[in-house]
Amino acid sequence: MSIVWIILGLILLVVGGEFLVRSSVALSFKFNISKLVIGMTVVSFATSAPELLVSLQAALDGSPDIALGNVIGSNIANIGLVMGITAIISPLIISPDFYKLNWPMMMLLSIALYFVLQSGQVINFTEGLLLFVSLIVFLYILIKRSKGKEEVDVEEVDDALQTTSNFKIIVWLLIGGCSLYFGSEWLVFGAKDVAMSYGVSERVISVTMVAMGTSIPELAASVIAAMKQEKAISLGNLIGSNIFNIASVIGLTAMIHPIALDNPKILTNDIFWMIGFAAILIPFMLLPKKFEIGRIKGFILLGAYILFVYMAFAGEK
């Protein structure tokens, strides 16, 4: 039955996230916010809502392993699983700008998270606030840099939402909010139940099953784009998701409720996998074919992810 709760929870999170994105974008248009700002802030925050609700619910329920594992595992899955499968279907073209801001920010936050956890074994309000402020600064720089360019990718912002009625926006917000709330409740409950039933730690379930589940929307969107062979496929959205996961999901969660480090393997194992998957993107982008992640690299990323999942479960025995 616990697997059923996990599946139902994931379905509600996907539905809730979609309705929240639509209502947030439609509401932003009502306030005459530009498409550029909507695409880089509103959409990004809304798509991080499922991870935020899951981590917050887990922290409040006294399951910090799920709160941390969800984010760390999701960041690993975004590169190993999502990027790996997408590259196998269609090569990923990388913009040179990627090195200048997005990748350094992802690495900086990943390493900062390690040192924050290592220093006090807990992420408190102040540390959460610093993480969140770093995101605001990052977005400010990103928007400022983008305004000077003629081509800015804001395809995720649907122009049709400009004519959405106030009634629809309210209904979508209610559906999105309720779906996210109950989805996170059921997913956390199911994950804890699975851990108890199968004799594995909450940390293993969160960095594998829960993280894979919350990465499904990114995987679906990337695979569909790859199958259509859209040239707009880039690492930007996936790396942006990783940045938001650490800075906004962990940051906001810690500001509401401190996140304690319960299982030491998160610090001695999982977080190094996350940093490793982020770091490998540099040699992958430079060798042998510059600024492209092709099928061979995709298979390597996917293979490494499968190895990570296997070792996570094997380490429990």
Image: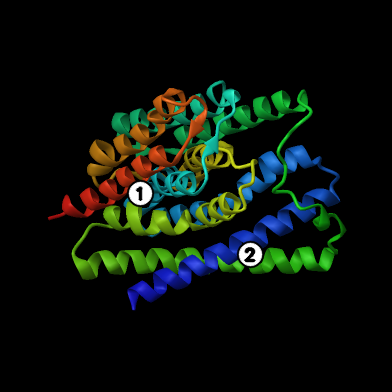
Q: Which mark is residue 176?
A: 2
Q: Residue at x 45, y 66 (%)?
A: 185
Count of labels shown? Answer: 2
Up the image or down, 246 lies above or below 164; here it is above
Amino acid type at image mark 1: Gly
Q: Residue at x 66, y 59 (%)?
A: 20
**Would residue 135 appear left or right of 66 to someone viewing this image?**
right
Q: Which mark is residue 216?
A: none
Judge the density around disc 1: few (<14), some (14-19), many (≥20) Cα neighbours within 10 Å: many
The residue under label 1 is: 69
Q: Position of residue 313 (x, y in %)?
A: 21, 55
Amino acid type at image mark 2: Gly
SS category of the residue bearing label 2: helix
Up the image or down, 285 lies above or below 54; here it is above
Answer whether residue 121 is visible to the viewer in this image.
no
Image quadrant occupied by the C terminus? bottom left
Marks 2 and 1 sit apart, C-alpha to C-alpha, by 24 Å
Check the image and name the residue furthest to the left.
Answer: 317
Say how the picture is coloured: rainbow
**Would residue 118 appear left or right of 74 to someone viewing this image?**
left
Up the image or down, 103 lies above or below 8; here it is above
